[in-house]
Image (cartoon, rainbow, N blue to C red):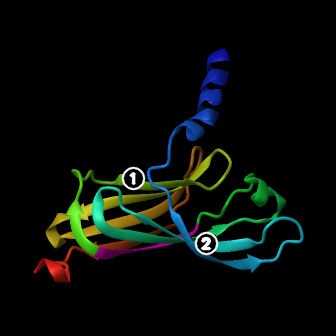
Amino acid sequence: MRKAKGLLNALLVLPFLLPSVVVAEEIGEVSTVFKWLGSNDKIVVEAFDDPKVEGVTCYLSRAKTGGVKGSLGLAEDRAEASIACRQVGPVRFRDELEEGEEVFRERTSLVFKTMQVVRFFDEKRNTLVYLVYSDRIIEGSPQNAVTAIPILPWPDQR
């Protein structure tokens, strides 16, 4: 029993010790549900650059729960998210890529739920593929979104 309690405590602390892979920049937001107390429910649009692939920016839209719990960071956000990644400059690989490598992670509840973006490289088509999904320690969600970027020469590279 003592070991199980220690393991549970470690699981509760672990998400706070793991740093986010990349920090997203908020681009904008729209309110979706008015709340009398606390912030409104909203959809947030954020952008982040792939840490290993120069010239690629991804845009995420996701729901953020408002109200008192949301304002205090205690609410659980919905699992739905949308992603669109684009080539914004010459593509250069800063490091070797790993299949299914996590490039972005954000907590969507106080402890147990996260939204993640992972990257795949489709070598046959010379295309980067990004997948966003949400998971929980106990039970994940099958809801996901995908985007793909064919790696093309940038105009000033020709």
The numbered disc on residue 28 is: none
Image position, residue 153 (x, y; %): 16, 78
Question: The magenta stretch spans which residues?
Answer: 80-88
Magenta-span inclusion, residue 82: yes
Picture quarter containing residue 81? bottom right
Q: Residue at x 36, y 61 (%)?
A: 50
In the drawing, does residue 46 fall left or right of residue 40?
left
Q: Which is nearer the N-term, disc 2 or disc 1?
A: 2
Q: Is residue 158 above or below residue 51?
A: below
- The residue that disc 1 covers is 102
Magenta-span inclusion, residue 26: no
Q: Amino acid at mark 1?
A: Glu
- Which residue lies most toward the front here? 156
Q: Estimate the spatial distance between the alpha carbons at disc 2 and disc 1, rounded to whole Å.
A: 21 Å
- Which residue lies most toward the top here? 2
Q: Provide the secondary structure element on which disc 2 rests.
A: strand
State which mark lies toward you, 2 or 1: 2
- Can you say which quadrant of the picture contains the N terminus? top right
Callout 2 environment at 10 Å: few (<14), some (14 to 19), or many (20+)?
some
In the drawing, does residue 33 fall left or right of residue 8?
right
Q: Amino acid at mark 2?
A: Val
Q: Is residue 43 above or below residue 50?
A: below
In the drawing, does residue 136 fall left or right of residue 105?
right
Image position, residue 122 (x, y; %): 22, 66
Picture quarter containing residue 117? bottom left
The numbered disc on residue 44 is: 2
For the stretch drawn in magenta, the main secondary structure is strand
Image position, residue 77 (x, y; %): 67, 61
Image position, residue 13 (x, y; %): 62, 34
